Amino acid sequence: MTDTTSQPIPPQRKSFVQQLELDTRLLGMVGAFIILCIGFDFITEGRFLTPRNIFNLTIQTVSVAIMACGMVFIIVTRHIDLSVGALLATCSAIMAMTQTDILPNMMGLGLGHPLIAPISIIVGIAAGALIGAFHGYLVGYLTIPAFIVTLGGLLVWRNVGWFLTRGQTIGPLDETFMAFGGINGTLGPSLSWIVGAVLTVAAIAAMWNGRRSKASHGFPVKPVWAELTLSAIIASAIMGFIWVLNSYEIPTARLRRMFEARGEVMPEGFTTTYGLPISVLLLIGIAIAMTVLARRTRLGRYIFATGGNPDAAELSGINTRMLTVKIFALMGALCAISAVVASARLANHTNDIGTLDELRVIAAAVIGGTALSGGLGTIHGAILGALIMQSLQSGMAMVGVDAPYQNIVVGVVLVAAVLIDIIYRKRTGDH
């Protein structure tokens, strides 16, 4: 008789990427982004990857990226929000009117008063959250499909913003308020290095704390060399980003005007750089808060549980109706914060602000890996998706591609991203 004793199966040797436990889909997105940047840099003869263009690219991405963070939760729970661009316009109009008309006339606070900016921002965020909560009530309690509610919102709020301003451009905005726009508000080189160092230490500490928590509960952990490699990658990425932003020097003419505004004379040969924009720091803060909300809180667990199986979530005791109201209210608040960034970057409120942003936001979330079938999505993926979208449009503009062709390319990329995502999930069994 033959010996049928089974031989022990040797453990399969893991690849370098598998030992690092990196998300292969995220790696693919990062690789596509790098190839995109290198390609545009080659076509534009080195103009795309300059510190100036990277600085502009980051501040242009912030507004859409902030809303994309909220859109992740909307799509994860199997809804959609088509009204984000129009809601941004309404919140922008409300804040602009608060600064230039309501506060000066009703409270006697002129531009430059220290209360102008905070009051305007609070009013705008409150308005955005209330409008979003109203959308959520219609969807959650009256069971009107989110597509219809927010499509109606797109038409309603865009024109509400127009009537609030009577179709006029509103400006100038408060100087403190405009600090959130990007180039008008930066940390400077020294403070940027300090913030970069703090973010690096915090990110690495969070990673090692996660390892310690896993080990204490008996879960398998990565090899120490893998953790050290990831720590080096994180530190290089953060500090490299700060280095690039600190390489963009403020033009001499602008520097001279800045000194003259303070009643000073600029020293001969003096130079300095912009550093990290406040708007980018705001995006980083929102991204961290939303990630913690998604991974560490009961609300986050409820959101992903509801998206995975709404019926089971409701049977388990989750109030899915109120959850819908909360998610849409959060989306409305984020639209208002995006309105701060967008109008501050333009230095005034315009009627076409936020036009087509709803499509860019949804595209960023989907390209970033948020599943339209619900239950899956990440905040960092949505931000990367927004950066890819903005890089694509910015690169095509630098090359000289006409706007209609740009929209065609963006549409093709969106459909291709969804197709690739479907194929990837089928192969990995991640539904």
Image: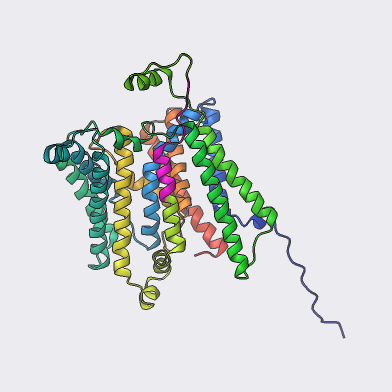
Q: Nearer the viewer, residue 115 or 343?
A: 115
Identify the residue shown where x is 48% and y is 15%: 269
In the image, 228 versus 110, the foreground residue is 110
Residue 325: quarter of image = bottom left
Residue 122 position within the rendered picture, expressed as x and y whole percent measured from the top left: 26, 48
Relative horizontal placement of residue 425, taking residue 362 as reference (left or right): right
Q: Who's the residue at 58% across and 64% down the image?
A: 213
Front residue (pair 322, 356) = 322
Percent from the top left, x then y, of residue 53?
46, 30
Render colour scheme: rainbow
The location of residue 303, given as percent across then percent down, is 39, 65
Residue 308, given in percent of the width and then of the height, sits at: 43, 68
Figure label count? 0
Vertical position of residue 402 compared to residue 9: above or below: above
Q: Residue at x 24, y 50 (%)?
A: 154
Q: Can you see residue 204?
A: yes
Question: Which quadrant holds residue 159?
Answer: top left
Instruction: Indicate whether 58 appears above or below 253.
Output: below
Q: Is residue 292 above or below residue 358?
A: below
Q: Write down the region rendered in magenta.
A: 271-286
Residue that extends furthest to the left in the rendered view of this protein: 106
Is residue 408 shown to the viewer in this render?
no
Report whether 117 appears left or right of 414. left
Most extreme residue toward the right, as rendered?
1
Name, please, the residue furthest toward the top: 268
Q: What residue is shown at x 29% (from left), y 60% (from top)? A: 146
Asked whether, in this view, residue 193 is left or right of residue 410, the answer is: right
Q: Quadrant of the N terminus?
A: bottom right
